[in-house]
Amino acid sequence: MKFPYEPAHINHKAGGKITLITGIGHALDKPQDGRSRDYWYFRGNVNWRDGTKSVNTEIAPPAVCYSDAAGKPAVDLLMAALNDYLLANGEWCREGWYAARKVKRAA
């Protein structure tokens, strides 16, 4: 999949229309308990129902949805691109996906 991608019929579950996906991103969250957690997201633009816009914002994959059958192929395409990104840049390790360089292997 090539980015930027202008999807048709794709919504944000919080009440907006996703108008542009510019790529897939990765971040490391370090909560107060000190346990870091990798997470992945789409980066793009959202037009919210209240008229505001978010530009170049993080969009969590579970927030991407479609309201009619015409949007399903676009969501499937985005999730396939995320899967390809994870396979190339991450590794599954019990609790979830981690950046490949951070996974420690048991002896």
Image (spheres, helix red, strand yellow):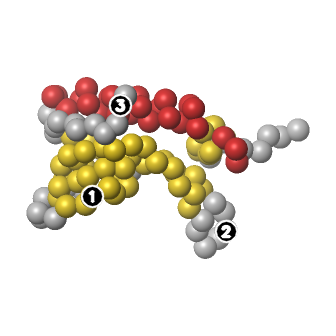
Looking at the image, which is closer to me, 89 or 70?
A: 89
Q: Is residue 77 left or right of residue 8?
A: right
Q: Are marks 1 and 2 in contact (CB under 8 Å)?
A: no
Mark-to-mark CA distance, 3 and 2: 36 Å
Q: Farthest bottom residue? A: 32
Q: Is residue 23 left or right of residue 16?
A: right
- Badge 1 is on which residue? 55
Quarter of the image where the C terminus is located: top right
Is residue 85 shown to the viewer in this render? yes
Mark-to-mark CA distance, 1 and 2: 30 Å
Quarter of the image where the N terminus is located: top left
Vertical order, 39 against 8 (above or below) = below
Q: Nearest to the eye among marks 3 and 2: give it.
A: 3
Q: Are marks 3 and 2 in contact (CB under 8 Å)?
A: no
**Amino acid type shown at disc 2:** Gly
Vertical order, 73 against 61 (above or below) = above
Mark-to-mark CA distance, 3 and 1: 19 Å
Task: Work out whether mark 3 precedes mark 1 in sequence or the reverse, and give the earlier one.
Answer: 3
**Amino acid type shown at disc 1:** Val
Q: Secondary structure at mark 1?
A: strand
Label placed on residue 98: none
**Crowding near pointer 1: few (<14 within 10 Å), some, many (20+)?**
few
Q: Are marks 3 and 1 in contact (CB under 8 Å)?
A: no
Q: Nearest to the eye among marks 1 and 2: give it.
A: 1
Is residue 62 shown to the viewer in this render? no
Q: Tell me which residue sits at (41%, 28%) in the image.
A: 80
- Badge 2 is on which residue? 34
- Badge 3 is on which residue? 2
**Crowding near pointer 3: few (<14 within 10 Å), some, many (20+)?**
few
